Amino acid sequence: MSFAEVNLFGVYVAPISLMMVAAWFILAALRRLTKRFGLLRHVWHPALFLFAVYTLILSSLILLTARIAG
């Protein structure tokens, strides 16, 4: 399992930073869905819940990328 830097317009970026941005976009889409259906109001602490979901999405992206690359 080896992650190499990504050349983004001449700037070398760590792959984790790109995965963090991708996880944030996925979370934003999920947040819209939960807001539309009113599911977030059933959670005790919405900010903590969203942080936990973000962490799960990010770790899943990292594991999936490691599995595909390795």
Image (cartoon, rainbow, N blue to C red):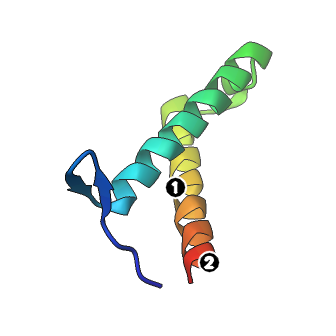
Residue at horizontal 53%, vertical 35%?
A: 25
**Amino acid on which disc 1 is placed:** Leu
In the displayed structure, does residue 20 sit left or right of residue 52? left
User: Tags 2 and 1 in contact by the CB under 8 Å rule?
Assistant: no
In the displayed structure, does residue 12 sit left or right of residue 33? left
The mark that comes first in sequence, 2 or 1, is: 1
Name the residue nearer the viewer: 30 or 10.
10
In the displayed structure, does residue 8 sit left or right of residue 24? left
Residue that mark 2 sits on: 67
Where is 33 relative to 11, above or below? above
Where is 57 relative to 49, above or below? below
Q: Residue 40 carries which label?
A: none
Residue 24 picture location, percent across and down: 49, 39
Q: Is mark 2 on a helix, strand or loop?
A: helix
**Amino acid on which disc 2 is placed:** Arg
Look at the image and tell me whether residue 51 can be seen: no
Name the residue nearer the viewer: 5 or 52.
5
Residue at horizontal 41%, vertical 82%?
A: 2
In the displayed orientation, state which residue is furthest to the left.
Answer: 11
Residue at horizontal 21%, vertical 50%?
A: 10
Quarter that holds the C terminus: bottom right
The residue carrying pointer 2 sits among few (fewer than 14), some (14 to 19) or many (20 or more) residues within 10 Å by Cα, namely few
Residue that mark 1 sits on: 58
Q: In which quarter of the image is residue 45?
A: top right
Real-space Cα separation, disc 2 to disc 1, in angstroms: 14 Å
Look at the image and tell me whether residue 38 can be seen: yes
The residue carrying pointer 1 sits among few (fewer than 14), some (14 to 19) or many (20 or more) residues within 10 Å by Cα, namely many
Residue 17 picture location, percent across and down: 35, 52
Residue at horizontal 71%, vertical 25%?
A: 34
